[in-house]
Amino acid sequence: MFELANRLNKIPPYLFAELDRLKQEIQNKGVDVIDLGVGDPDMPTPKPIIEIAKEALEKKENHRYPTYKGTLSFRKAVGLWYKKRFNVRLDAETEILTLIGSKEGIAHLPLAFVNDGDVTLVPSPAYPVYAPATYFAGGIPYAMPLLEENDFLPVLDDMPENILKKTKIMFLNYPNNPTSACATKDFYKDVVSLAKTYNFMVASDNAYSELYFDNKKPISFLEIEGAKEIGVEFHSLSKTFNMTGWRIGFVVGNDEVIEGLGKVKTNIDSGVFQAVQEAGEKALNHEEEITPAIRDIYEERRNLVNEYLKKLGFSYKKPEATFYFWIKIDRDSASFAKFLLEKCGVVVTPGVGFGKEGEGYIRLSITQDKERLKEAMKRISNAL
Ligand SMILES: *Cc1c(COP(=O)(O)O)cnc(C)c1O
């Protein structure tokens, strides 16, 4: 009776209905399924953050509508953390905006700057938000392939001139989901220069900046000279502090971009619950005491899974950041995922779900404890 709007028909079809059905069927048979498919931390939010939230919940001033931009004290905490972590100075009034999770801000950005027929540059494979957000705004996403031979960085010289002329936003995401690749300063320098030449904005998604290994800290796009003139960076408290369910993130950088996005948001949402912002402020102010323990756990898990995968002879790059292994396989990704589910009761994500260039890979998340990961790896070893 009700036909969906055309914009929804442009969204790529959901590819995993069959795998979801199969997972359910196998679980119903009583098989103990190990899910290494989701990008959602398995660990709870650290106690000190929860304690602050409990206190903040009791304050009656927090029960009212929050301010649109976020509380000034949360934005100031973001500014201090950015200075400490990346040595980037930000004005809390004009260059920082609180988001209902970074996904929310990313999804709304094209509504502020993309007109019908405008282009956005979207990595492939990618976190599946950039392209749908572009379609919703009437724009056309143009895929930038992320290939192993280029260290999963887009080749800027390959971008056609006529596309660059129509480009409004370039989306980038490093440390990258799903490939786990990190960006270099030189690459970002080339991005800044291209963006200035063609007058488009850069939206850097840095959700995994704190989930790094071997003490190799990923950089911020905004560390590059001139980056703030053309770009913004999205951050999330979700992965850094195991807070996916709380819905809080932020965007920082170019004041015109922030103002435009803010304009869209004041017409759509009414901000983040202030008790959650108080908890987020505490988290950021104590990041150096909280996050290392989380990082250490992932690093142990990464080392464990790496040992097994190496022995099995898989082809992949040992992740330097994120909680994903991006593993090359010699057949199509959906059938390999189906094989692992049927033979081992292990769920992984077929690479093709992240875009055409993800075909030939699977993504394995280390969002399970060491015992479960060991069990999954043993089952896979036995099946191969
Ligand atoms: C998890 C994730 C996010 C965002 O998360 P929020 O919970 O919305 O802050 C953003 N980008 C990438 C690439 C992610 O994997």
Image: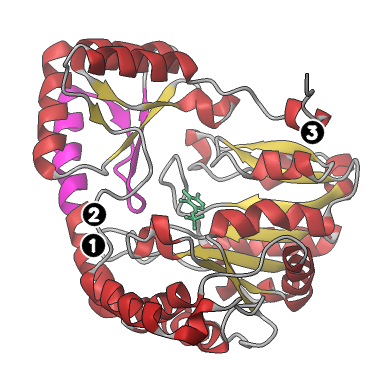
Q: Nearer the viewer, residue 361 or 32?
A: 32
In magenta, the rendered stretch is 299-328
Q: Nearer the viewer, mark 1 or mark 3?
A: 3
Residue 309, quarter of the rendered image: top left
* Mark positioned earlier in the residue sequence (1 or 3): 3
Label 1 close to label 2 by CB (< 8 Å): yes
Q: Position of residue 121 (x, y in %)?
A: 72, 45
Residue 153, quarter of the rendered image: top right
Q: From mark 2 to mark 3, how far is it between C-alphas?
A: 37 Å
SS label for mark 2: loop
* Label 3 environment density (alpha carbons within 10 Å; few <14, some 14–19, many ≥20): few
Q: Nearer the viewer, residue 384 or 317?
A: 384
* Label 2 environment density (alpha carbons within 10 Å; few <14, some 14–19, many ≥20): some
Q: Nearer the viewer, mark 1 or mark 2?
A: 2
SS label for mark 1: helix
Residue type at mark 1? Ile
Q: Is mark 1 within 8 Å of ligand 1?
A: no
Residue type at mark 2? Met
Q: From mark 1 to mark 2, how far is it between C-alphas?
A: 9 Å
Residue 108 within the magenta-colored segment of the rendering: no
Q: Quadrant of the N terminus?
A: top right
Q: Residue at x 24, y 15 (%)?
A: 28
Residue ID for mark 1: 294
Residue ID for mark 3: 7
Relative to 377, 288 lies left or right: right
Q: Position of residue 329 (x, y in %)?
A: 36, 19
The image's colouring method is secondary structure
Q: Residue at x 57, y 53 (%)?
A: 103
Residue ID for mark 2: 43
Q: Is mark 2 within 8 Å of ligand 1?
A: no
Note whether 94 is above or below 177 in the view shown.
Answer: below
Q: Quadrant of the C terminus?
A: top left
